[in-house]
Image (cartoon, helix red, strand yellow):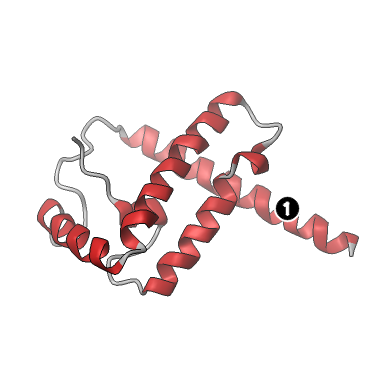
Amino acid sequence: MEFEDYYEALGVGPDSSANDIKEAYKYKVNVLHPDRLMGVSESIRSRAEEDLKKVNRAYDVLGNPTGRKKYHAEWLSTTNSKGNMKNVNENISEKEVKVFSILEGILGLLMLIRAVRRFRRK
């Protein structure tokens, strides 16, 4: 089974507080929720659904102090001193990583636009 970097999934560092993890989880769930992605292509929706599942798994582990402690020990053994994965995700190309980073930026921008529109209506 492939090791998943839950810190990366939530966009937090290993030294983040429990509150930081909770806030990151709420933000990610809000951005990736299927109801928020009406009108986007099916491929983006399916990718967001996969990412949402990963975020939920990450929070299940990191949101629990005992689970986080066990996970952190395993995470340390699979990362180098800079926190980068040690050849764990060799099957993911740099191009795919850039595409997913861009996708996350677009989703965040869409959420911002939606919030601005709601604010203007009030």
Is 40 left, or right, of 28 in this rendering? Answer: right
Q: Amino acid at mark 1?
A: Ile
User: Foreground: 85 or 98?
Assistant: 85
Crowding at mark 1 (Cα within 10 Å: few <14, some 14-19, many 20+): few
Q: Which residue is mark 1?
A: 113
Residue 61 position, x and y percent, is: 31, 56
Q: Is residue 47 above or below residue 24?
A: above
Q: Residue furthest top?
A: 42
Of residues 105 and 55, the one nearer the viewer is 55
Tell me if residue 52 comes above or below residue 69 in the rendering: above
Q: Position of residue 25 (x, y in %)?
A: 47, 58
Closest to the observer, 87 or 48: 48
**Residue found 54% across the figure and 58% down from its top:** 27
Q: Is residue 85 above or below residue 12?
A: above
Q: Residue furthest left?
A: 77
Q: Secondary structure at mark 1?
A: helix
Q: Which image quadrant: the C terminus?
A: bottom right
Q: Position of residue 71 (x, y in %)?
A: 21, 58
* Residue 65 picture quarter: bottom left
Q: Residue 79: percent from the left, percent from the top?
A: 15, 54
